[in-house]
Amino acid sequence: MSALKLYIGNYNYSSWSMRPWLVLRKSELPFKEEVIDLDVPGYKAKLLALSDEGTVPVLKVNEDYLPDSLAICEFAAKAVPNLWPKDEGQKQLARDVVERMHTGFKAIRREAPMNLRRRTSGKMPKECLEEAAEICELWDDLLSRHDGPFLFNDWSIADAFYTPVATRFASYDLPRTTRSDTYISELMSDEDYLEWESRAFSEDHTMPETEKVNL
């Protein structure tokens, strides 16, 4: 087994770090992790020492460095295929759903950044609310196709990608349907997520600019 080390940002804020961390935990592949505090003096130099992109997460595989959340998840799925749905058609749909999150929903990222310690019910911008409704519509459609609690019945990489989104609904009290609310509760009661959340609540680091968004 290759020696794996995952470099991540802060638990409270780094949504992109959470995604592959959850996938690696579900894969049961052994890995170490290192947190790099974000938005502090010298943090960018640390990130650029890991990859040209200068972002987290980055997975070190032996002496190679693999940046990008989705690429890391695909690496894990090569070793543990059941991280994607078994059916080829469902697998492709899951990949499409993940890509939609990977490249889209920019308003909700901007107006409701991940902040696990935050609880607010202030008025949110229209574009953010429209994307929240779009996400709920996507979730409801996928969940209506089976009896399982996750987007493709069993837990998959798609659920890892939408877990940080689910936390935004809780943090900013975004409107959601009954079915989506049940899905959010399922994701946020997962034992691996709860471990991540407990670390977020206990870490001291804060990002003032993120804390100011939509106060």
Image (spheres, rainbow, N blue to C red):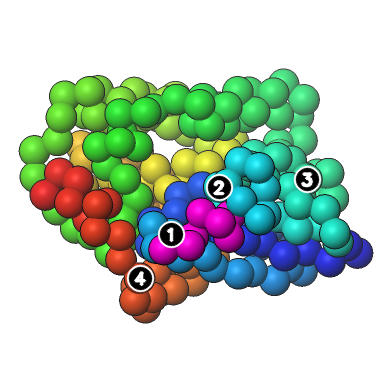
Q: Are marks 4 and 1 in contact (CB under 8 Å)?
A: yes
Q: Spatial distance from mark 2 to mark 3, Cα to Cα? A: 18 Å
Mark identifier at residue 75: 3
- Number of the label disc, if any, that sits on residue 1: none
Residue 94 included in the magenta stretch of the image: no
Of the residues shown, which amino acid type is indicated by label 4?
His
Q: Which mark is residue 38?
A: 1
The answer to whether residue 4 is left or right of residue 23 is: right
135 to 204, vertically: above or below: above
Residue 205: mark: 4
Question: Distance between the Cα atoms at labels 3 and 4?
Answer: 30 Å
Residue at image position (62%, 29%) is 94
- Name which of mark 3 and mark 4 comes first in the sequence: 3
Name the chief secondary structure element in magenta: helix
Q: Nearer the viewer, residue 127 or 50?
A: 50
Do the residues under discs 3 and 4 have CB atoms within 8 angstroms? no
Q: Which residue is mark 2?
A: 55
Q: Earlier in the sequence, mark 4 or mark 2?
A: 2
Pointer 3 with pointer 1, Cβ within 8 A: no
